[in-house]
Image (cartoon, rainbow, N blue to C red):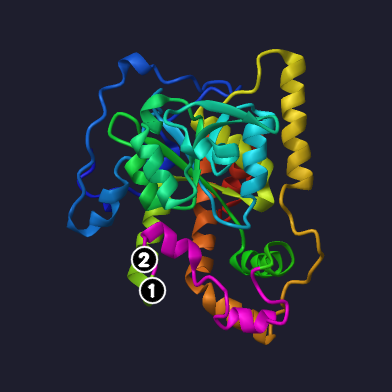
Amino acid sequence: FSTGVGQYNLDAYSGNNNNNNGEEGEGEDDYESLPPPVEKIYDEDHQYLVPLRHFADVKDPHRPTDTAFFFHVPRSGGSTLKDMVGKCLKLVQSSEVGVRDGHGADPILQVIEINESKYVNVDTTTVQGIQRAVDLGLATSNYADLVVSSYLHQSASLFDLHHQARAFLLLRNPIERATSMYYHRVHELGDLDPEISIEDFAQGNGIENNWMTRFLTDRMEGELTKADLEQAKDILKQKFMVGFIDDIEESIYRFMKYNRWKYAEDENQKMKEEDCVKDLAMVGSNINPNEYELPKRGTQAYALITWQTQFDTKLYEYGKELFDLQTKTYGSKERKKILKKQKKKGGKL
């Protein structure tokens, strides 16, 4: 157990969590020799982690009863990731798709197939849907290989000491994400009047204020403080395997390793799955069909979006540090070589 996660430093990622994904010298944890899980105890300064205590820490050993949890940051490659998991890796997900065709009223859990992917018949992307999934015993059923939600704190009720979540996320530059969201809402969702300019949007007419910081800390209202940012950073450090939309192939490699997902043993099938992932990494899913330009530095739109995402931008930069630190245990061979070269040169990670 932990008596206050503040005592962990970033180097803790050198890790107990060795996963066998084709890398020499990194074997499976011996599940039988693992001690039973113990409730985490947090000191006074880290009480904000109590609601997330059944999300495993990154340094915790993998257990066969763990369930992967994708914290979906909107407009950050989530649809692409979900297609990789479902269409390429053939894993079972719980997201919003499983309740289509009336399955949201099913009295028991079941796995259904929709568009070449498998889903549990619950919707973990809404608060109401999460409660239904809790009532039906989603985590204890072991039906889902992956739970998808943007509601981190509400999803905590899905898990318990003996059925924990292993969380990961994809990050995107907050200015790019906010701009993508504006054009997505204008052209695709249609819930934003086209007459609203991106400047008006960024001034508070539809923009999300520091979405990531708020959803990580569950601070949905009021002014954010530096203390909120520090909490969000600590939650990210303790609880998340970090990936990036602009480094998605390396990120999916790490997510697979972290969650013990494997390509098929059959060589032909394995090649198909690997090609499927690479193709999706190239073209993406649910991308904006209309080309648009990012606001330029010095413009009003850039200044306003920067102000609205100031905490998320700091969190994004911190995510880069974590990504580099997680390379030691979870990075690909190529990325580990680059890391070693940087260290030899004395370069900053």
> Residue at position x 73%, y 18% from top?
269
**Which quadrant of the rendered structure holds the N terminus?**
top left
Q: Is residue 146 left or right of residue 89?
A: left
Q: Picture coordinates of residue 226 (x, y %)?
A: 37, 72
Residue 58 visible in rendering: no
Q: Nearer the viewer, residue 32 or 109?
A: 109
Give the magenta-colored segment's residue range.
191-220
When asked about the image quadrant of residue 21, the answer is top right
In the rendered image, the vertical position of residue 27 relative to residue 93, given as above or below:
above
Q: What is the three-letter code of the residue carrying label 1?
A: Leu
Q: Nearer the viewer, residue 321 or 242?
A: 242
Q: Is residue 165 left or right of residue 313?
A: left
> Residue at position x 37%, y 50% from top?
154
> Residue at position x 74%, y 47% from top?
284
Say which label, 1 or 2, has the lower sequence index. 2
Residue 206 on the magenta segment: yes
Disc count in the image?
2
Q: Residue reaching furthest left? A: 44
Instruction: State how far apart marks 1 and 2 are (Cα).
Output: 8 Å
Q: Main secondary structure of the magenta part?
A: loop
> Mark 2 — residue?
219
> Mark 1 — residue?
224
Tell me whether circle 1 and circle 2 mark residues in contact (CB < 8 Å). Answer: yes
Residue 281 on the magenta segment: no
In the rendered image, the vertical position of residue 68 relative to residue 190, given as above or below:
above
Q: What is the three-letter code of the residue carrying label 2?
A: Arg
Residue 341 visible in rendering: yes
In the rendered image, the vertical position of residue 38 relative to residue 7, given as above or below:
above
- Label 1: state its secondary structure: loop
Q: Picture coordinates of residue 76 (x, y %)?
A: 62, 55
